[in-house]
Structures are given as structure tokens and as C-alpha cells.
Amino acid sequence: MSARVGLQVAHRRYVPYGHAHYGGALVDGAYLLGLFGDVATELCIRGDGDEGLFASYADVQFRAPVRAGDVVEARGQIIRVGNRSRTIEFSCVVVCRAQPERGGSAAQVLEPPLVAAVATGTVVVPSPTVAGEAVASDG
């Protein structure tokens, strides 16, 4: 395991109608932040062997609506590795969208995908240890 700049993961998920929060089957932005948290957790596991903890967002931009019935892809990529911190760039795109006006189960693939949100966040992981003793590090 080695956290490194460039390490990335992606999750795809169908957005169920039970997550619609506003008129027009709109999903709240917190849903996307939850997806970013899941992506960050996998990055920490792959890079550090630990789930890590989300510390902060430096920037979050919601660029397009997400609706119930969408299929979204959340991606994350480590852009900076510190002693215990990892800075991650996130994006969430809508890859498929329901088309209820065509029928109850009608949907389409979006080409190109619609960018719904982007963000930058920081996670922290435990200090490396050897036999229960903290290992000194530079950074």
C-alpha cells in the first residue's frame, strides 16, 4: 500500500426515487457529498490500508442538477500526499438520465456525461506504526 499522487477510484450508482428531496425529483447536494465520502474512503483503504477520516472541503461547486432515476459516477484522485493528509479532487457526472415524459421506465445515456459537481477535499489517515510505535516522518 502506498498513497501516491494520481491514485484514483470511481463509483457508479443509480439514484433511487427515495432520494428525491425537492420538486422535479431533484436530489439534494448532500447526496453527492456522501458519494465523495465513499470515494475518499476507498482511496484511503487502497493507499493507506485504513478508512481515514474526512477533514474538510476546500471547495465544492454544484454545476448541474441530479435527479432521481439518474446514474451518476463519482470519481476521486489524490493530488497531494502529506505526512497524514491526502488532498483529493472529486467530480460527479450524470451518465444516464430518466426520461419520464417518454414512459415510466424510459431513460437515456448522456453523451457527453453532465458534470453535476466538483470538489476538493482533505482526508487524514493514522500515522504509520511499527510494532505499535509511531514512525517518524518528514511530511
Image (cartoon, rainbow, N blue to C red):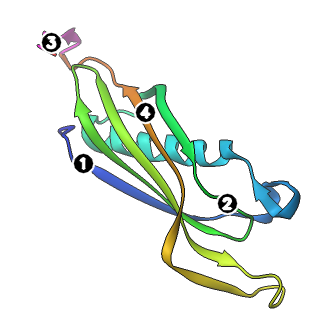
Q: Position of residue 10 (x, y in %)?
A: 40, 58
Query: Badges 3 and 2: C-beta atoms under 8 Å apart?
Result: no
What residue is shown at x 26% (from left), y 17% (from top)? 127
Q: Which residues are magenta?
A: 131-138
What residue is shown at x 35% (from left), y 54% (from top)? 9
Q: Which mark is residue 66?
A: 2
Q: Residues within 10 Å of mark 4 (few under 14, many from 20)?
A: many
Q: Which mark is residue 125?
A: none
Q: Indicate the amino acid at tag 4.
A: Gly
Frontmost residue, 102 versus 135: 102
Q: What residue is shown with label 4?
A: 121
The Cα–Cα distance between marks 2 and 1, rounded to whole angstroms, is 26 Å
Image quarter (top left, top right, bottom left or bottom right) of the C terminus: top left
Residue 137 colored in magenta in the image: yes
Q: Hey, which quadrant is residue 71 in on the image?
A: bottom right
The Cα–Cα distance between marks 3 and 2, rounded to whole angstroms, is 44 Å
Determine whether the residue tagged by mark 2 lies in a helix, strand or loop.
loop
The Cα–Cα distance between marks 3 and 1, rounded to whole angstroms, is 23 Å
Q: Which numbered disc flags the more N-terminal residue, 3 or 1? A: 1
Q: What residue is shown with label 1?
A: 7
Q: Residues within 10 Å of mark 2 (few under 14, many from 20)?
A: many
Q: Nearer the viewer, mark 3 or mark 1?
A: 1
Taking 18 as reference, is 132 left or right?
Answer: left
Q: Residue furthest bottom?
A: 102
Determine whether the residue tagged by mark 3 lies in a helix, strand or loop.
loop
The Cα–Cα distance between marks 1 and 4, rounded to whole angstroms, is 15 Å
Q: Residues within 10 Å of mark 3 (few under 14, many from 20)?
A: few
Q: Which numbered disc flags the more N-terminal residue, 3 or 2? A: 2
Q: Position of residue 42 (x, y in %)?
A: 39, 45
Q: What residue is shown with label 3?
A: 135
Taking 88 as reference, is 91 left or right?
Answer: right
Taking 63 as reference, is 53 left or right?
Answer: left
